Image (spheres, helix red, strand yellow):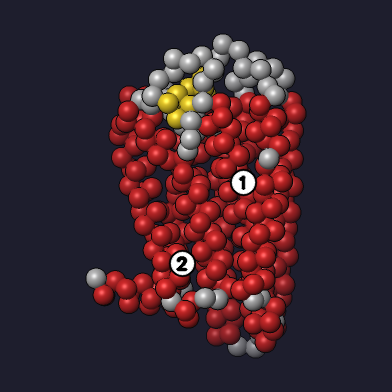
Amino acid sequence: MPGFNLTSSDPSNFILMGIPGLEAAHVWIAIPFCAIYIIGLLGNFTLLFIVSKEQTLHKPMYLLMCMLALTDIGSTSVVPNTLCIFWFNLKGITVGGCLTQVFFLHTVTVMQSAILVTMAFDRYVAICNPLRYSTVLTNTRIMKLGLVGLLRAVLFILPMPLLLNRLQFCANRIIPHTYCEHMAVAKISCGDITVNNIYGLVVACVVTGFDLTLIALSYGLIITTVLRLSSMKAHQKALNTCTTHICVMLTSYTPCLFSYMSHRFGKGIAPQIHIFLANLYVLVPPMLNPIIYGVKTKELRDKVGKYTCRM
């Protein structure tokens, strides 16, 4: 991300401290972080490469996988800065660079949620209205839904850096985190952060609440349809098409909700635990998602095997 500096000589810059209290272990913590980061990049770029090369995979479901892979790559963009803090003690970051991180990281998070909703809708149409699937969910329509999700993310998140920019930062410009998160930056202000706190909570509740409601509605209709099927084999086949999406939702929403809520209500949670889990949130889902898709999606697994055998 832009704005990362070698030193903190400029008093107007922020200082990212990494994981306070675990400074002595930073070098060792960075090793698994780096390994997870590399595995995640390889998995997501492999997914993007295979789908782009294989014409048979140019379908709505695989386009959604590619969108999720792009957001996963985007969410890990803060990891190189984190590794620089851990290994080289490069802690300075400009105000502009910090606000850019806030905007980009939270935009990607909201965009991921929109993609998961679209995936739930994809599963609903595939199971409840299979004969209309090819007409309801076209590649063009998926791209349009993706653009709507991106526009929604930008509109919701754009006020966050603007609200941070209006705050007064006095002598304390030390952020006890490895990257710039909205509330982590707001908390070091010497001004009133009530508006920031309320807006961040509203965004979390509205976006996540609305998206989870739509996902729950989709799965409610799916379960109703599956229960009407006569054979157990048909039940199992229908539900198997949803397990991948459910696994991805669990890896995405669980740490995200914890990060949002612990900033506001988790006063008893040690800062080290919160920051460590916040880092796992930007590292683990991007690593697991392509693995989950590779294991659970036979067509994709076969294409991976095809290209692996060529090497």
Residue at (66, 17) in percent of width and height? 168
Residue 156, picture quadrant: top right
Instruction: Please indicate whether residue 258 sits to the left or right of residue 72 in the image.
Output: right
Amino acid under disc 2? Tyr
| Relative vertical location of residue 187 with respect to residue 208 in this rendering, above or below | above
* In the rendered image, the vertical position of residue 196 relative to residue 72, given as above or below: above
Mark on residue 293? 2
- Around disc 1, counting alpha carbons within 10 Å, would you say few (fewer than 14), some (14 to 19), or many (20 or more)? many
Residue occupied by mark 1 = 107
Alpha carbon separation for disc pair 2 and 1: 24 Å
x, y percent for residue 36: 37, 48
- Disc 1 marks a residue whose amino acid type is Thr
Residue 67 falls in image quadrant: bottom right
Of the two numbered discs 2 and 1 on the same chain, state the one appearing first in sequence.
1
Q: Quadrant of the C terminus?
A: bottom left
Q: What percent of the width, then of the height, locates residue 197? A: 70, 30
Secondary element at tag 1? helix
Q: Does residue 64 sit above or below 106 in this rendering?
A: below
